[in-house]
């Protein structure tokens, strides 16, 4: 078929996931229902053993979980001495509340076929958010993506402005497109925030959608689609 795109389909599975919202560091640590595209770039970076950027690949994904809950977590508190050194706070450890999702499964589609080797033999362990939310990759297959104008889509992350006649329900969130991590010893810098619809990952059904950048993978039924993210310019 004309305009088909060759791609990789890989599955990531884990026990827990926790994707903290940017700039939210107090109160209950809430988790986004699906990962941001910057988080997925970080997961690919762990697999490749190098920094992966939007220039390396386009990304489409479906992310489903069984349920979510909130847990108590013990934290280590630090204080800064006058000379700039860090030491354990005199008041000892603290306790915080953290939201997490249970039994995450992510089916990811990448347009760069060169990722096959690093997904089959990751350099480092990828994780669904925090380092303890480790995940594994049961398979990596080559597929074809055929462009379509509508179809049924599962839980994913769609730019708010991209919806047309048929949209989908979701939580409106502001997330970074990409996080720059070039300068060693300095805080990572988010590169441009976009507004997205984050669909409910605990939802079992799929939704009819009509928008740009929809594709039907060759290993799914003809009515099933994914949104293949088109990166905004960054720099």
Image (spheres, rainbow, N blue to C red):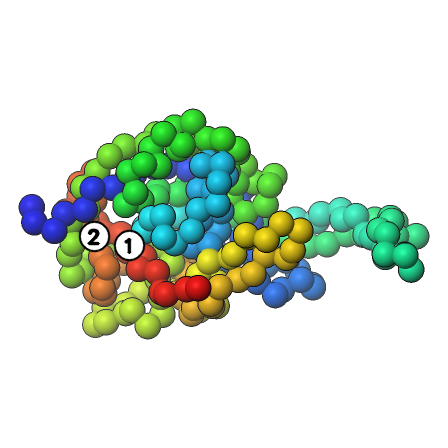
- Residue 82 locus on image (x, y percent): 91, 60
Label count reads 2
Residue assigned mark 2: 215
Residue 103 visible in image: no
Give the residue displayed 48% in from the left and 51% down from the top: 39
Say which residue label 1 marks: 228
Q: Which residue occupies the extreme front position in the image?
A: 183
What residue appears at the point 73 percent right and 54 percent down from the top-left corner? Answer: 96
Residue at the outermost top position: 121
* In this rendering, position of residue 231 left or right of residue 208: right
Residue 169's x, y, as percent?
35, 65
Nearest the camera: 158 or 152? 158
> Quick check: can you spot residue 97?
yes
Residue 69 x, y percent position in the rendering: 57, 50
How would you rate the neighbour count of disc 2 (Cα within 10 Å): few for under 14, some for 14-19, many for 20 or more?
Answer: many
Residue 218 is marked as none
Locate the C terminus by quadrant: bottom left
* Element class at badge 2: strand
In the foreground, 86 or 156:
86
Q: Is residue 29 above or below residue 116?
A: below
Q: Secondary structure at mark 1?
A: loop
- In front of the other: 157 or 52: 52
């Amino acid at each position: 078929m004309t305009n088909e795109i060759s791609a990789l389909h890989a599955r990531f599975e884990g026990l827990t996931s926790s994707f903290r919202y940017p700039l939210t560091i107090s109160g209950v640590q809430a988790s986004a229902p699906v990962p941001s595209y910057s988080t997925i770039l970080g997961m690919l970076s762990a697999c490749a053993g190098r920094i992966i950027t939007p220039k390396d690949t386009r990304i489409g994904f479906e992310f489903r979980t069984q349920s979510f809950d909130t847990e108590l977590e013990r934290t280590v508190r630090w204080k800064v001495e006058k000379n700039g050194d860090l030491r354990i706070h005199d008041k000892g450890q603290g306790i915080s509340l953290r939201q997490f999702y249970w039994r995450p499964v992510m089916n990811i589609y990448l347009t760069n076929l060169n990722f096959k080797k690093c997904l089959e033999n990751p350099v480092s362990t990828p994780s669904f958010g925090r380092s303890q939310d480790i995940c594994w990759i049961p398979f990596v297959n080559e597929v074809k993506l055929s462009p379509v104008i509508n179809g049924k889509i599962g839980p994913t992350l769609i730019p708010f402005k991209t919806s047309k006649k048929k949209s989908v329900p979701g939580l409106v969130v502001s997330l970074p497109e990409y996080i720059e991590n070039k300068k060693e010893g300095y805080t990572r810098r988010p590169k441009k925030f976009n507004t997205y619809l984050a669909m409910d990952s605990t939802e079992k059904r799929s939704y009819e959608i009509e928008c740009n950048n929809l594709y039907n993978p060759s290993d799914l039924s003809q009515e099933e689609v994914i949104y293949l993210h088109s990166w905004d310019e960054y720099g």
